[in-house]
Image: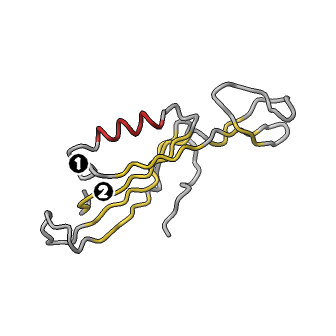
């Protein structure tokens, strides 16, 4: 657990085109966190709209699962630019100090881990939307 005593919050980003239903993900994470240091953690899921760019006119528009021509020029099919994300953005933990009694929550330091790596269904290489303050 890398010295983490309690996971407080988990922040996840899910794209509308990632093939993952946010309510189903939250339900499964609630089950998976039982009997772990994350059992009381809040799960925060941010849904990202699917967007596509037209290679002909350069316009960017909302996009769904269906292949559609550009709504502006009707010339070309949109290329996905967002909405395929599936990533853990950050995990907030309370970190215990060395030698501390693990049952004591007193004098714990609040630590936020910002995760740089992520999984994307289509291999997008965009940087995370959240960054350390």
Q: Position of residue 96 (x, y in %)?
A: 22, 68
What residue does disc 1 label?
A: 36
Near mark 2 (Cα within 10 A), the count class, few <14, some 14-19 or many ≥20, is: many
Front residue of this view, candidates 125 and 72: 72
Q: Where is residue 34 in the image (x, y as percent from the top left)?
A: 24, 43
Identified at 81% across, 43% down, the residue is 58
Question: Relative to 66, is 108 on the left or the right?
Answer: left
Identified at 48% across, 33% down, the residue is 21
Which quadrant of the structure image shows residue 77? Answer: top right
Identified at 29% across, 38% down, the residue is 31
* Farthest residue, direction right: 73
- 71 to 44, vertically: above or below: above
Secondary structure, mark 2, is strand
What residue does disc 2 label?
A: 7
Identified at 48% across, 66% down, the residue is 132
Q: What distance separates the C-alpha of mark 1 from that of mark 2? A: 9 Å
- 114 to 82, vertically: above or below: below
Q: Do the residues labelled 1 and 2 touch (CB within 8 Å)?
A: yes
Question: Relative to 30, is 133 on the left or the right?
Answer: right
Can you tell which mark lies on residue 69?
Answer: none
Which quadrant of the structure image shows residue 33? Answer: top left
Figure quadrant of the N terminus:
bottom left
Sequence order check, earlier mark of 1 and 2: 2
Q: Where is residue 41 in the image (x, y as percent from the top left)?
A: 32, 52
Question: Relative to 5, is 103 on the left or the right?
Answer: left
Near mark 1 (Cα within 10 A), the count class, few <14, some 14-19 or many ≥20, is: few
Front residue of this view, candidates 26 and 78: 26
Q: Position of residue 121 (x, y in %)?
A: 52, 36
Secondary structure, mark 1, is loop
Q: Which colour scheme is used?
A: secondary structure
């Amino acid at each position: 657990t890398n010295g983490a005593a309690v996971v407080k919050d988990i922040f996840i980003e899910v794209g509308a085109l990632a093939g993952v239903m946010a309510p189903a993900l939250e339900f499964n994470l609630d089950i998976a966190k039982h009997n772990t240091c994350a059992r009381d953690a809040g799960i925060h899921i941010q849904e990202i709209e699917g967007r596509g760019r037209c290679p002909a006119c350069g316009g960017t528009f909302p996009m769904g699962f269906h292949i559609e021509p550009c709504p502006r020029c009707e010339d070309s099919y949109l290329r996905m630019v967002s909405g395929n994300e599936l990533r853990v953005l950050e995990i907030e933990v309370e970190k215990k100090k060395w030698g501390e009694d693990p049952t004591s929550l007193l004098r714990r330091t609040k630590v936020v881990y910002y995760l740089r790596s992520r999984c994307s269904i289509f291999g997008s290489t965009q940087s995370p939307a959240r960054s350390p303050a």
